[in-house]
Image (cartoon, helix red, strand yellow):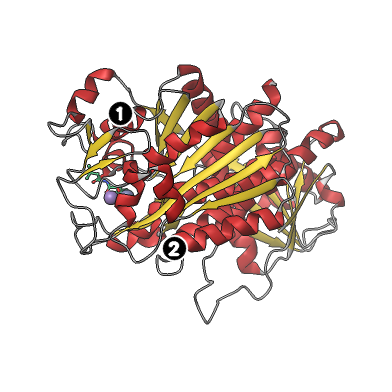
Amino acid sequence: MEFTAKSGNPEKQRTACIVVGVYEPRRLSPAAERLDQISDGFISSLIRRGDLEGKIGQTLLLHSVPNTLCDRILLVGCGRERELHDSQYRKIIATTTTTLNDIGAMEAVFYLTELHIKGRDNHWNIRQAIETVENSLYRFDQLKTKKDSARRPLRKIVLSISSRRELSDSDAAVNEGYAIAHGVKQAKDLGNLPGNICTPSYLAEQALEMAEEFDSISTEIIEQAEMEQLGMGSLLSVSMGSRQPPRLICMNHNKGGDSKPIVLVGKGLTFDAGGISLKPAAGMDEMKYDMCGGASVFGVMRAVAELKLPLNVIGVIPASENMPDGAANKPGDVVTSMSGQTIEILNTDAEGRLILCDALTYSEKFDPDVVIDIATLTGACVVALGQHASGLLSNHSPLAHDLINAGKSSGDRAWELPLWEEYSEQLKSPFADLANIGGREAGTITAACFLSNFTKKFHWAHLDIAGSAWLSGDKKGSTGRPVPLLTQYLLDRCQSK
Ligand code: BES
Ligand code: MN
Ligand code: ZN
């Protein structure tokens, strides 16, 4: 999709379709008002007859409106003006996008970006519109032999801004919108790919392609033999039960001079059967999404490289399958992690922390400014927060604070849970330094507590995306989260420098 930000009067637009908002109850937005004036009350007379109340989700398509230069005008319900917040705005943009795509308008001018959203500005409206349009048009049909593509797909959208003064800022917003949308798309595609295609070696190949595509990125792949030399006994114990060899993927975006890097560690478990502690059959297919943390690292690296952010950002992805097999690790096994700490594996299905702990220890070598890991780590997080927020735990409150704020401003929110030392009682083992599970209570917190034993040397935050990374049911699919949150965090870091 092509997006441009422009200022201009609605009555002067020569385009296939102009999109303007109507508030509830039957109140015209300023752009709709202008069109109404030049058409001698054409729009208001329709509205008065009751054709459109202005509720969110409603649309009305008008043809041949007098004195306009456009082919059609799409009126879109915006709900009550006072109640117009982020999520309403996203719904309005999504409804508009699918309607335009269905009616075969190949280009459109959106006046919706001029709507007043509480606490938001022009920059946010534009960027969020781009992200939302791309989200609503996203389809994963790579693996279908017959694709149901629109006959006349929407190709070009002009996003209106109210004054020319905002133009340069709008161009920045468009670029950020593109970069985040591209990153989200990559994360979604990788997430939606099935486990038989998206294996650890497939992810490694994709990382090498990232280095081909972007000058700022270099990639290093660590294979099994090297992991053995490094002493990654915990990571290796997870991949042992699989025919697919593990990979430790490192992508390095180098544009921050000699500043300390921000390291992103993403869980890349390409299929989680649970291992010997086998998962139940129902819904097990969704465990192909267990690499969504890793996928989000790809997405963020892409966004950062496209925006050429002046930062050093390193993405580290431990990639493995978790399968039952004669060589698989067993409940009761004790393994030695790269840090030297020993771990008693009481449940082989708590494998995410086992691969992450070695990747976190490995990250020490980059002398990081901060380390953020992203993982579909616990079912307990889905119970606690559902799909709307990612779980956040951190050993450094300024970092937690920055991530929460980045979540708020990007609309990709996180919610903090406590990482109190009392919880680590639950991880005591009679046979090793640590157990890999902490019982039924506070599962998301004890998982993070486990990881905190491997992050003592740096500022660290953990994002549990078990609920936010994909949707189930009839909307089944990867969401691309938390690419917007993390990209926002990195954009904010550039501002504060
Ligand atoms: N990948 C899962 C977590 C998960 C489960 C995410 C369901 C989303 C939906 C993880 O590896 C896992 O199996 N965790 C176990 C941990 C338990 C054994 C302590 C869980 O959450 O049940
Ligand atoms: Mn598991
Ligand atoms: Zn898992």
Answer few, some or many: residues within 10 Å of disc 1's Cα (few below 14, many 20 plus, some between 14 and 19): many
x and y percentages locating residue 219 in the rendered image = 61, 50
Residue at point 53% right, 58% down? 204
Residue 199 is labelled as 2
Q: How many marks?
A: 2
Residue at point 43% right, 49% down? 227
- Would you identify the image quadrant in which residue 416 lies? top left
Residue 194 left/right relative to 275: right
Residue at point 79% right, 36% down? 162
Assign a secondary structure to mark 2: loop
Give the residue type at disc 1. Answer: Cys
Residue 18 is labelled as none
419 versus 157 height, above or below: above
Give the residue type at disc 2. Answer: Thr
x and y percentages locating residue 420 in the rendered image = 29, 19
283 versus 409 height, above or below: below
**Mark 1 lies on residue:** 449
